[in-house]
Structure formats: C-alpha cells, structure tokens
Amino acid sequence: MTTQAETNPKAALERRRLFIYKAFLLLAILNNGFLAGYCMLVRGGGLFAHVPHWAALTIGGLAAVTVMFAIAALAWQKWGIYGMTAAGVAAAGVAAAVKLIPAAIIFAVGTAVLLLIARHQWQRLE
C-alpha cells in the first residue's frame, strides 16, 4: 500500500502559509477591492480627474481581476501568482502611460514584493 506522500510529492510538503504571505494576499484583496470599486464608481472623477476615462476603468478592471487572483493564490494555486504578477505589470504600464508615475511605482513595487514573498511558498503551490 502506497501513501499519499509517495504518489504525490507535493503532499509531502506541509501546507503552512507564512504570515507575511497570508497578510500580503489579504491586504491585496482589500486594497484592490477598494481600488476597483473606487475606479468603477467615480469613473474618471475624484482622484482620477486628470486621467483619461479609459485608464481609470482599465486600472479598476485590473484591480478587480487581481482580487480573484489573490483568492486563488490563497487557495494554493500558482496561476493566482501568475495572474497577480501580470495584472500588476499591466497596471504599472497603464499608469506610466498616462503619467501617473507614483501609481506606476507602487504597482511595480507591489509586484516585486509579491514575487519575493511567493518564492518561499512556491513548492507548496499547485
């Protein structure tokens, strides 16, 4: 009789999230949820008054998708990390294209921090 650890090497790894990994993903869910709601409700007004309408909606849409990817990453899915990385790079590109340099830096740094934190959990992800 074979054990699950013998048939599935990933089962041998203890699935314990690092506090910083879990905290970062929960913070990403909260922040991106707020950002998505703000961008969709304000629609280019408020803080985005000087930003083209398409850019505010694109950043809001990317934030909404990032919430889904963060939930997937909390559920031990590698594609959640891939998606969060792609959305962060895309959001940084959109922000840089419309001259929102501080926002572009925040998106880029957030993506880099995600990758640094996720590398310690990578073997545990499916």
Image (spheres, grey):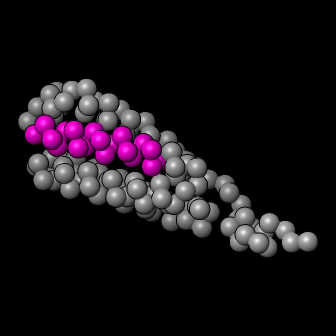
Q: Position of residue 16 (x, y in %)?
A: 66, 54
The answer to whether residue 68 is above or below residue 89 is: above
- Residue sitting nearer the eye, 105 or 44: 44
Asked if residue 105 can be seen in this view, the reply is: no
Image point (42%, 42%), residue name: 67
Quick check: 80 left or right of 40? right
Q: Quadrant of the N terminus?
A: bottom right
Quick check: 44 left or right of 14? left
Image point (52%, 52%), residue name: 73
Q: Position of residue 27 (x, y in %)?
A: 45, 41
Quick check: 52 left or right of 76? left
Look at the image and say whether residue 65 sits in the magenta stretch: yes
Asked if residue 67 can be seen in this view, the reply is: yes
The magenta span reads 52-70
Q: Hey, which quadrant is residue 57 in on the image?
A: top left
Q: Position of residue 116 (x, y in %)?
A: 45, 63
- Residue sitting nearer the eye, 32 or 82: 82
- Residue sitting nearer the eye, 1 or 88: 1
Q: Could you tell me how many numbered marks the image carries?
A: 0
The answer to whether residue 48 is above or below residue 41 is: below
Q: Position of residue 69 (x, y in %)?
A: 45, 49
Dominant secondary structure, magenta = helix
Query: Quick one: which residue is furthest to the right in this view?
Result: 1
Query: Quick one: which residue is furthest to the front in this view?
Result: 1
